Image (spheres, rainbow, N blue to C red):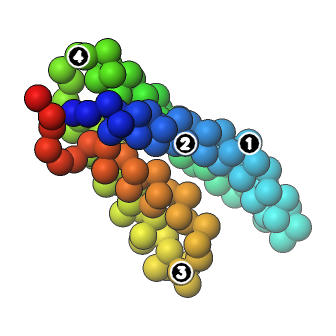
Amino acid sequence: MNRSRSILGLVAGVVMMLSAAMHSLLGWKQLRSELELLHAPAELVRALGTGWNFGGAAMLAFGFIVVALFTHRLKGSLVTLRPAIVIGTTYVAFGAGAMVVNDVDPFFLVFAIPGALLLIASVGRRSA
């Protein structure tokens, strides 16, 4: 695997970690405000918040896994990139699916683009 692809993998992982923070800190604040304007029941808001913040925690964990894999690769370790491929595929599939069900809202590129970068970094020929 060449160095530039490992760096691309690191960049994708860092973007995933940053987007996790934005998702949980800013995204939930905005969504909660909108739910309150609609006078959503407190139990519903609490349940949605739990799921929303679990999503952010999972995104953060995915980013850490990706950064760890590519950091080890840059140091010359032989590690499998299968977890990165699964994560990248999940991000691309979710981003594409979310765009389809949300009238091609470009917001969901925040999932598809890091996933695509991760797949580019993870799949293909390895250099000797």
Q: Nearer the viewer, mark 3 or mark 1?
A: 3
**Mark 1, other Cα within 10 Å: few <14 / some 14–19 / many ≥20:** few
Q: Nearer the viewer, mark 2 or mark 3?
A: 2
Spatial separation of the CA atoms under disc 4 and disc 2:
23 Å
The percent position of residue 7, horizontal first and vertical second, equals 41, 33
Q: Residue at x 38, y 56 (%)?
A: 116
Type of the residue with mark 2: Val
The percent position of residue 74, horizontal first and vertical second, equals 33, 22
Q: Nearer the viewer, mark 2 or mark 1?
A: 2
Q: Residue at x 32, y 15 (%)?
A: 75
Label 1 SS: helix
- Disc 3 + disc 4, Cβ < 8 Å: no
Specify the label residue 25 is tagged with: 1
Q: Which residue is mark 3?
A: 104
Quarter of the image with the N terminus is top left
Determine the image quadrant of residue 76.
Answer: top left
Q: Nearer the viewer, mark 3 or mark 4?
A: 4
Label 2 SS: helix
Decide which of tag 3 and tag 4 comes sooner along the chain. 4
**Mark 3, other Cα within 10 Å: few <14 / some 14–19 / many ≥20:** few
